[in-house]
Each structure stands twice: as C-alpha cells, then as structure tokens.
Amino acid sequence: MTRLFGRELLHNFFWILTLTIVLAGCVRVNVQNKEQKVSITKKESGFDLYKDNKPFFIKGAAGFTYMDILARSGGNAIRTWDADNIAAILDSARKHNLVVMIGLYVVDPEKDHSFYKQPSKVNRQFRTIKSIVNKYKDHPSVLMWCVGNELNFPNPLIPDKFYPAYNNIVNMIHKDDPDHPVTTAVLNFSRRMIVSLKLRCNVDLISFNIFNNITHLKEDLKKFSWFWNGPYIVSEWGVDGPWEGTEKTIWGTHIEATSTKKAEIYSTRYSVHMPLDDDRFLGSFVFYWGNKQETTQSWFSLFDKNGCPSEAVGTMQYLWTQKQPPHRAPQINYMLVNNKGAKDNILLSTNERAFADVSLLQPDTAISKVVWQIMQEDWFKKGSASNTTYFKSLDELILSSNGLRLNFIAPRREGPYRIFATIYDKYGNFSTCNTPVYVLSK
C-alpha cells in the first residue's frame, strides 16, 4: 500500500510540476516576422505557415528523387533525414519550384548512452550542424530544419546531458538562421515525447512520423490539446510497415499488400484520417517518394528501381490537385501460389514444381510486360529490424512465364522466399504484388 501511495504521489507531483511549468509560459511563441523567409503565424484559432509572406500548406513527399514528377503531381515540398548531398538536392528542388525540410542528424541518446557524456563528441556534432546551417540557410529552397528523426527524448524531469546539447543546436539555428523554423520528427503521437519537447526543448513545431496510428490521430490531438496545442506537421505517413500489427505468416514473414490496395490505403488515410481541417496542421510528407529496400523493394516505394510510378503516385496527384492521372496502373486483385494465398501459409518442398497466378480486378489491354522474380528473404532480424539487403532474383528457378502465370521450381535450399510479380503498362506505370512461401527440405 505504501509503495502504491508513493507511486501515485510521484505521478501527481509530475503533473503538478508539468502544469506549473506550462502555466509559467516556457514555450516558444511563434509570431510572424515580415522579414522572415519562412515563418509560423499564430492566429485566433490555430497557426499558419508562411513562405515569402504568402500562406504555404505543405503537400510534401518524404524522399529526394523524381522531383519533376512530384511537381507535376501537385506536390510542393520534400524532406530529407540528413544533409548528405544536400547542395544538389536543394538545387534540384529550386529547379522544380519545390522546398526542402532539411534533416539534421543527431545522435539518439537512447541508442548511444555515452555520447552526450563526452564533450568532444558533443562539440563536434554541434560544429557540424552549425556549418551545415550557415552554409545553406540562404538557399531559396530551404523550408525548415528538422533536428533529429525519431529521437528518444529522455525523461524531462531527470537531469540529463542530452537536453543542453540539443537545445544548444536549436538555439544556434534560431540565432544564425531566424528565417526558417526548427522542428523535430517523433515516432507516432507520443504523449511522453510531446511532454519532453514542451518542457525541455525550444522547437517551433512538432513533426509526427505516423503510419497505422494515423487512424486515431485526430482523436489523440483533441484529447491532449489541454496540454499542447501548438503547430505540427505529419513528416511521414503511408501504408502500414512490416512491424507489430501487420499480418504475418506462421514463420514470421510479414504479408505485403498489393500496390492496388496500397493506393486505396493512401487515399483513405489522407482524405479521411489526415487532420486537414485542424487549424494547427501545416501539412504532410507522404512516405516514400522513391525506391528503397525495406523488407522488400516495394513495401514503401512509390516508384520502381527504374523510376516508373506506381498507382499511389496518381493517387497523390488526385489528393493534391483533384485531377485524376490520364492512365491508371493495372488493377491487381490477388496472387496465388499453387492456388493458395499468402494467409494460407504456403509450404513448398525443395525442388518441387509449383506455379503462381495473378488475378486482375478487370482485364487490362494496356499491359506491356510482367516481370516475375523469386527472391530469398532474410526475414529474421534482431530487434525486429527490417531487411535492407536486396537479394538477386533466382531466375534459374523459373521454368516458364506467360503473362500473369509463372511456372517454377522451388529452391534447393530450405528457408523463406517471396514470389514477386511486377506488371507494367504501355504508359510507364507499374503494379506489383508478392507472396511469401517457405521451402522445406524433403
């Protein structure tokens, strides 16, 4: 009983102290300065983002490639996670009339506990970021600075060497570059992170990387507005990733949706769940505008490796402009392997003859080719880390392929694999799907 009372007392003390600090007005106040290139203006009911004294709502993409297609699709901004190759990225953005939220890499205090106890490393990090900010702050395509991505901010009530180091960076940017706001990207709508930022940091707005939890973002924002009612953006959003909550096979491989289903998800999440009517909301960045290997080469990618757009690109064009693209990518219904779907936990024997079929929602006479691939999968990673290794297709296992049908031999080596089908049309669009299988030794 004494233990429980002590815990409750500590909990109450935390919130009393929190409210005391909040009421004392420790939060950075955003007031538009007409001389600023980019600013956040507080108004009676919320906030507005201004660029060059004009209202600017972010219709952005997380990524830094295919900017020409982004601009044609109605997008106006991109984001990076670090400053690698940032000069070329800024110049390309300017060419396409886009702006950039520049990521500034900061060591996560939870992943490297000793870093912020070493002044030499902290000073080196500070000097590196200061150099980047001062080198590029006058570039016309800079939108804002994002100091850290998905950092684990420590308990704000416990003395920690991280906060002085972090605030030195934020305060330096405010001093050296008053023309651009400063934010940080946190994972999901985390009350703990918001409390830490509100009490201990001096950022101008909060950015949320949020995927499946976007379905209750509006409710989360409303319920916590008593404590924090500042401006925000959604810095990453998209389809559910290969993590907790996503369906898996019995051997632990995550099941990926077809590109057709993903386009539907993008549409619903933006039009239904994005807080577009919230006066505090300044815009968002769809994830991922490019091609990347994360569990598969297609999971988050809105483009293939050669730059062909998926249906989701056309979906974003419609969401941003209300104009449909002239040609829709092939509409995939499902894929079957030996007449079984991914949820059937497909098992094959080594060297077994098998087949795969793709079913379309409707016939498509514009299909130009279908590329089949059999890929090994390194699906087990310590700490549930996603597989970033791109394996070569085992084309020697393909017996024949005739459009939407594949005949193949199961690999000789036991383990997890995926069967991929990528369908291209004559307009340059592609659709894709894959099915995981597990091969057992005889």
Image (cartoon, rainbow, N blue to C red):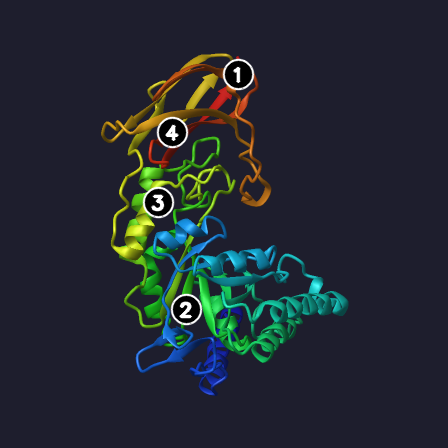
Residue 215 vs 370, above or below: the answer is below
Question: Is 329 above or below relative to 190?
Answer: above
Q: Amino acid at mark 4?
A: Ala
> Residue drawn 32% across and 51% down?
317
Which one is closest to the eye, mark 4 or mark 1?
1
Q: Position of residue 102 (x, y in %)?
A: 53, 62
Say what secondary structure mark 2 lies in. strand
Instruction: Identify the mark nearer the N-term, 4 or 3.
Output: 3
- Marks 4 and 3, how far apart in space? 22 Å
- C-beta proximity under 8 Å, tags 4 and 1: no
Q: From the image, tell me which residue sits under label 3.
A: 312
**Secondary element at image label 4:** helix
Quick one: SS at disc 3? helix
Give the CA distance from mark 4 to mark 2: 38 Å
Q: Which mark is residue 396?
A: 1
Amino acid type assigned to the residue bearing label 2 in the image: Tyr
User: In the figure, is residue 114 to the left or right of 274?
Assistant: right
Pointer 2 residue:
232
Of the numbered discs 1 and 2, the one sitting upstream in the chain is 2
The span from disc 4 to disc 1 (Cα, nearest Å) is 23 Å
Please provide percent x and percent y for residue 396: 53, 16
